[in-house]
Image (cartoon, helix red, strand yellow):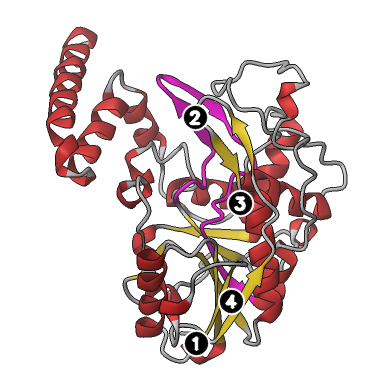
Amino acid sequence: MIESKQLSVVVQGVVERKITHKCLRSLRKNLPDAEIILSTWEGSDISKLKGLYDIVILNQDPGAIVFDDISGKANNLNRILTTAQSGIAAASREYILKIRSDLILKNNNFLNLTDDFVLRNPNNILFKQRIFAYENFSIKYDYKFKSKQRMLFHISDWCHFGLKEDLKELFNIPLVKEPEFSRYFETHCKQVNDIHKPRLWKMSPEQYITSANAAKVFPSLNFETYLDRTDENTQISEEFIINNFRIFSAKDWGMACLKIPYNTYNIAVNSPFDYYSDVEQNLDYKKYCDPSIEIPDYKFLKQVFSLKYFESLRRHFLQLIFCPWIRKPSEIASTALYFFLFLFALIKKD
């Protein structure tokens, strides 16, 4: 187990007084001997946060460009890079936990996390050790309504844990040129089908950070936009991720998000074959790192998920469990609907 005195915590992002206060207070409580670095923006009101951090860095805000005119969402990629780079540079300890300023630690369980994937392909390694990443938004497929789409290099940027030298390398990538990056498809045609038609950016922050690091190991990588889903890019994405990252759930981390709507978000409602669940990581580890390892036989599980309406039934049932009370009536109705649809489909199949 790593002790908190070996650890620097980089808290990155905007200061929201109540949320950021809870974030820093949870760090002080669960990591009493850690060095806490708050990396935020010039002009932030930090007067109520005294004593909850050891170092504060007030960065010049590089700004964020709207990438979706319908939702009005802006791309915070350069902000993520700026606060992470300056915060990591200021860290003095051997290990770094980098988290968003709207996350809280409920315990210090992440200090007990271990990389149980022993082998790595030396040709595909960038970091000295695998970096631990967060399960939420570490995805292989994205959904919109009933359509899904392959997403490469999509490892969550919510939090990372690892050696300082490895996190420094992870964020040793240039800021993107704006507005060209976030408004790319305003002047370029999408040559393939896309479930996210309003999105104008080249790719998400998660994809940029991961693919920019993969390019350090795979010189042949040609991943210009999130729609470049070639067979070669798909293999590079899987090989790079399984050799350089280990993904754990929010429960494993002992973490929670305070920001709406992510405070109720749970990726486990999705199929375990659609994100970097333990199932998918086991399959990729056997495929790319250690073919001799014994893993569970997931054939039956895949067959179950292929049954008509099963995945929808499972998703709504889990959402019923985890969703806030205001949404429970609609989830009860959806769960009941898909239960009967699933039941009738089974009877008809038999």
Tag 2 secondary structure: loop
* Front position in the image: 33 or 218: 33
Q: CA distance from mark 3 to mark 2?
A: 44 Å
Give the residue type that dot 2 points to: Ser
Q: CA distance from mark 3 to mark 4?
A: 32 Å
Q: Which residues are magenta?
A: 136-163
Give the residue type that dot 4 points to: Ile
Q: CA distance from mark 1 to mark 2?
A: 39 Å
Residue 34: which numbered mark, if any? 1
Q: CA distance from mark 2 to mark 4?
A: 34 Å
Closer to the N terminus: mark 2 or mark 4? 2
* Residue hosting label 3: 291
Badge 3 local density, few (<14 within 10 Å), some, or many (20+)?
A: few
* Residue hosting label 2: 71
Q: Are marks 4 and 1 in contact (CB under 8 Å)?
A: no
Badge 4 local density, few (<14 within 10 Å), some, or many (20+)?
A: many
Residue 96: which numbered mark, if any? 4
Q: CA distance from mark 1 to mark 3?
A: 39 Å
The C terminus sits in image quarter:
top left
Closer to the N terminus: mark 1 or mark 2? 1
User: Residue placed at 74% from the left, 67% from the top?
Assistant: 169
Q: Are marks 3 and 2 in contact (CB under 8 Å)?
A: no
Give the residue type that dot 3 points to: Pro
